[in-house]
Amino acid sequence: MLNPIHLRTLRECVRTGSFAEAARGLGYTASAVSQQMMLLERAVGAALFERSARSVRPTAVAQLLAERSQDVLGALAKLESEARAMALGEHGTLRLASFATASARVLPPALAEIVARCPGAEVELDEGEPDEVLGGVVDGAVDLALVFEYDLDPREWPISLHRTELLAEPLTIAVPSAHAAEGPEVELAELADEPWMCTREDTAGARSLGRLAHAAGFTPRIIFRSNDYTVLRDLVARGLGVAMLPGLAVSGEGIRALRPAGVTASRRVLAVHRPHNGNPLLPVALDCLRIAASTLLLV
């Protein structure tokens, strides 16, 4: 394979017609230039110069190499520049995954900051529950995923992944604004006869509500289930029942978020990634996510 350094030297020799002049222009010694041209002649299997005491005359092969190598060297220089930019995080692709409430509250400011820091980077985003996105992180299809874990329903994580906690969302009880409950807290037992709304039965949120209610001495009467906390919140606002919501899901009008008395349980938002992922955009994303999470005001 032809050495690009030798090709650059060849082009200077052809341009100047002198090894000595080429050496001065490139910062080499004349003997170094001569040695490079000998190695290049050996690589192509043909003489490149007719040598005399005062000058060198390029052969037809040398002229061909000098002319055709311009595009090759330009492409290599561009490739080198692109590789350096990617290594610095100025270009490249960052593949993210998240769950709905984090996508709505955490990601917008974080993504804006990532783009501001690395305007040449491309960010791809997919959405799903933890069990739906973890496989992509493990097999390398996703660089980083935002996932959650309830204190009342701990789970096991793949040992091959590194976890960074971004925030802990307090679990709150959402009631309609006109509800009779007073103060910032409520005894769960006082809501035993209320109609409840909750996530699907096979979810950590549903299991956490069941455990909280069991500790308070009742089984909640679930009238509606949805994994979309926006739907649950809006149904509460219309006076159709009450629901347990994590902090990121508490927003909008028509509801009050009460703390369950004597309970300090949370849903924790984590960023997970492979510890040896060399994507230079990954530490940028982690830093931007930490900043975005730290500025959130949760109930």
Image (tube, rainbow, N blue to C red):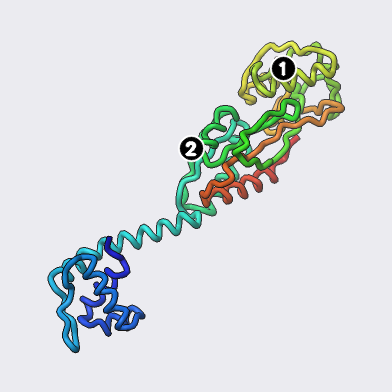
Q: Amino acid at mark 2?
A: Ala
225 sits to left or right of 6: right
- Residue 249 in the image: x percent, y percent? 67, 30
- Residue 125 in the image: x percent, y percent? 51, 37
Q: Amino acid at mark 1?
A: Gly
Q: Is residue 252 in view from this perspective?
A: no
Res. 11 image quadrant:
bottom left
- Residue 113 in the image: x percent, y percent? 57, 49
Give the crowd class for mark 1: few <14, some 14-19, many >=20 residues within 10 Å.
some
Res. 265 image quadrant:
top right
- In the rendered image, the quadrant that contains the C terminus is top right
Question: 235 or 262: nearer the eye?
Answer: 262
Under circle 1, the secondary element is: loop
**Up/down of 83 relative to 184, above or below:** below
Residue sitting at 73 percent across and 15 percent down? 196
**Up/down of 86 relative to 53, above or below:** above
108 sits to left or right of 52: right
| Spatial separation of the CA atoms under disc 1 and disc 2 | 43 Å
Residue identified by numbered label 2: 141
**Up/down of 97 relative to 85, above or below:** above
Question: 142 or 289: nearer the eye?
Answer: 142
11 sits to left or right of 213: left
Question: 183 or 161: nearer the eye?
Answer: 161
Residue sitting at 68 percent across and 28 percent down? 155
Residue identified by numbered label 1: 239
CB atoms at circles 1 and 2 under 8 Å apart?
no
Say which label, 1 or 2, has the lower sequence index. Answer: 2
Under circle 2, the secondary element is: loop
Residue sitting at 58 percent across and 50 percent down? 283
